[in-house]
Every structure is written in C-alpha cells, then in structure tokens.
Amino acid sequence: MKENNVIAKNSNKKLISKRIMQLILGLTSILAIYTAYLGFAYGAVNWYYGFADGQEYSKGLLMLESNFRFYNGLWLGVGIVLLWLIPRVERETTTLRVIAVCFFFGGIGRLISLLFCGIPSPIDLIYVIIELGFPLLTLWQKHVFN
C-alpha cells in the first residue's frame, strides 16, 4: 500500500513539474512570437530605439535594419518551435537542448554588449538572466523525465 502511495506522489510531482515546464515554454514562445512581430512591424529604426520619425537610412542603418528583421525571423522560428515543443516536452530533449544553447549564446552576446556598450534599459538585464538561465530547463527536463 505504501509503495502505491509513493508511486502516486511521484507521478503527481512529475505531472506538476511537466505542467510548470510547459507553462514556462508557453510564456517564452508567446514572448518570442510577440517580439518578433514587433521587430517585423516596426524594424530597428523606430521611436523605441531612439530614432526620430522619418529617420534617414545611412548604409549602417540599412544594415542594422536588415539584420534586425532577419534576427526577428529567427526569433519567430524559435517561438514556433517552442509552441510545437510544449506537448512533447518529455520526449524532445534534443530540441530543447539546441534551443537552450542558442538562448545561452544569445545571452553571451547581449552580455558582451552590455559590458562594452552600456545598459540600454533595465529590461535588458532581465533578458540576460533569462537567456543565460534558459539552459537550466534542460537539467530540469532531464531530472523530471529520466
């Protein structure tokens, strides 16, 4: 009888962990898709980034604009893959690991920018923490589903 209770408790903990992980992936995917939409819709040269309306495009700004929209396309792809991953989180370990590595290296890039160029806004510090901490999900996934 005790053994059945232990098994039931472990199954319940596993289900709760799975749901929390799915929620985190869902929120991350919504954030990724929404920010990708904003990047596609407004580009890099807009009021949010300190540019005036009707800003002339120098060659540097054209390159920034092109790269910005390209990276937002990648971000949209990450968001879609994360949505796809939600119901498969216990089986798709490789997919989550690949995304986690990409997040981590993106966080390294952002951290380098913050260190060398300064902090554009406090939210960027939160992004760095999320990006560098995202790989912890893979450890949690391994612990819960193995």
Image: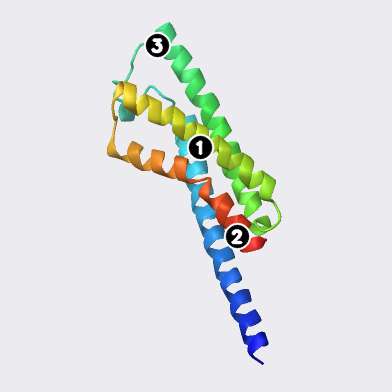
Residue 16 marker: none
Confirm or deny contact between disc 1 and disc 2 (CB under 8 A): no
**Residue 73 rendering spot, x and y as whole percentages:** 56, 31
Please indicate whether residue 60 sits to the left or right of residue 23 in the image.
left
SS assignment at label 1: helix
Q: Which is in the foreground here, disc 1 or disc 2?
A: 2
Mark 2, secondary structure of its residue: helix
Residue bearing the label numbered 2: 143
Local crowd size for mark 1, using a 10 Å CA cut-off: few (<14), some (14–19), many (≥20): many
The residue nearer to you, when weighing 131 against 9, is: 9
Q: Residue at x 45, y 31 (%)?
A: 108
Q: Residue furthest front?
A: 2
Mark 1 or 3: the one toward you = 1
Q: Is residue 94 above or below residue 51?
A: below
Q: Estimate the x, y position of residue 49 in percent, counting from the top left.
A: 33, 26
The CA span between labels 3 and 2 is 50 Å
Residue 57: assigned label: 3
Residue depicted at 28% across the width and 34% down the height: 121
- Residue that protrudes farthest toward the top in the picture: 59
Disc 3 to disc 2: CB gap under 8 Å? no
The amino acid on which the numbered mark 3 sits, given as a three-letter code, is Tyr
Q: Is residue 76 above or below residue 86?
A: above
Q: Is residue 98 left or right of residue 111?
A: right
Name which of mark 3 and mark 2 comes first in the sequence. Answer: 3
Of mark 1 and mark 2, the one earlier in the sequence is 1
Q: Which residue is mark 1?
A: 104
Q: CA distance from mark 1 to mark 2?
A: 20 Å
What is the tally of numbered marks visible in this picture? 3
Is 134 drawn above or below residue 44 in the view shown?
below
In front of the other: label 3 or label 2? 2
Q: Residues within 10 Å of mark 2 (few under 14, many from 20)?
A: few
Q: Residue at x 45, y 27 (%)?
A: 109
